[in-house]
Amino acid sequence: MNSSEVLDVLIIGSGPAGLAAAVYAKRANLSILVAEKEYLGTGQIAETDQVDNYLGFSKINGYDLGEAFRSHAEDLGVEFFEGMADGFEKTDDIWSVHFADGQTIRARAVIYCAGASHRHLGVDGEEDYIGKGVSYCAVCDGAFYRGKDAAVIGGGDTALGDALYLSDLCDKVYLIHRREEFRGSAASVQRLKEKENVEIITSAVPARINGEQTVTALELKDGRTIPVSGTFVAVGMQPQTEYLHGVVELDETGYIVADETGVTSAAGFFAAGDVRTKALRQVVTAVSDGANAAVSAAEYLK
């Protein structure tokens, strides 16, 4: 785009929140651009094997649902820009967003939908074996462990879903959680308990991931060693807000402080999706966030 051009809205992120924001902003006849850090990206939904809780789409593959979202935006004429936003400043009611490749895009409003990334355990051996037995996406890498033993670490819905998915591929799946109770769905926990090849280990904390060329075992702090070929880490997310310190208000865990309207502490800067403070982070709430943020941005621009 022309460096002197000023957009109505620059949307950061092309996941469900960003694409929903793009559809609503485009239909409001605003000049917009969606900046994405991954070429033709549709967010983390693309890593999900099956989505069965998005209204109207029963048991759809996550990649296919993400592609449907993107196609909807493209059909409306939404344009995309590939780049990693790493700087934000505002002058005279115009936001200047700087990108890692040196480009700057200016807009009267920004809708930030960059999402969150997988948290790491921080134990010895973890970084050494990423891609060699340590994974943060069971759907992406589970097929590599067909007929082998694997461990899933975590207690939320992602961990439970990963364990269920892997139980259909692996000989044995160990689900390891640091607490007695799980945060995830009780129905999923019950399904796992009924699986003959799943062993649930609670009140257990990983201490080290061992291996040779690839992962061979997981050590727990109580001294137990569990022989596995794969370790799947599902212990939460890290919001992609490292470049927003001093730009907008963040909570103690790094999420942007914003309610359902997407309005933040900075005028003309809106947040949507997994990156904002909220109780439920699902596709349906991300899409809702994107729509709300676009409506809020349109009202702000008036």
Image (cartoon, grey):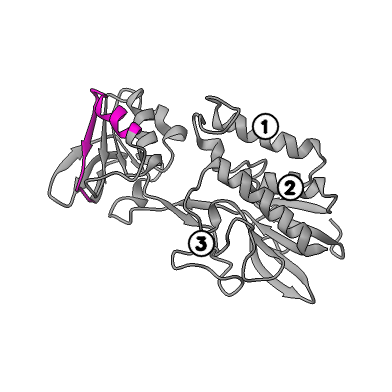
Occupied quadrant, residue 230: top left
Neighbours of disc 1 within 10 Å: few (<14), some (14-19), many (20+): few
Q: Position of residue 163 (x, y in %)?
A: 34, 33
Span highlighted in magenta in the image: 187-206
**Residue pointed to by mark 1:** 68
Between discs 2 and 1, the one toward the N terminus:
2
* Residue 131 higher or lower than 196, as above or below: below
Tell me: 102 left or right of 118. Answer: right
**Residue pointed to by mark 2:** 22
Q: Residue at x 49, y 30 (%)?
A: 49
Q: Is residue 188 magenta?
A: yes
Q: Residue at x 39, y 40 (%)?
A: 157
Q: Residue at x 32, y 44 (%)?
A: 155
Cβ atoms at labels 2 and 1 below 8 Å apart: no
Residue type pointed to by label 3: Tyr
Q: Separation of disc 2 and disc 3 at Cα? A: 22 Å
For numbered disc 1, what is the local secondary structure? helix
For numbered disc 3, what is the local secondary structure? loop
Q: Separation of disc 2 and disc 1 at Cα? A: 14 Å
For numbered disc 2, what is the local secondary structure? helix
Cβ atoms at labels 2 and 3 below 8 Å apart: no
Q: Is residue 222 magenta?
A: no
**Residue pointed to by mark 3:** 255
Between 152 and 186, the residue placed more toward the observer is 186
Q: Position of residue 269 (x, y in %)?
A: 68, 65
Residue type pointed to by label 1: Ala
Q: Residue at x 52, y 25 (%)?
A: 59
Q: Residue furthest left?
A: 223
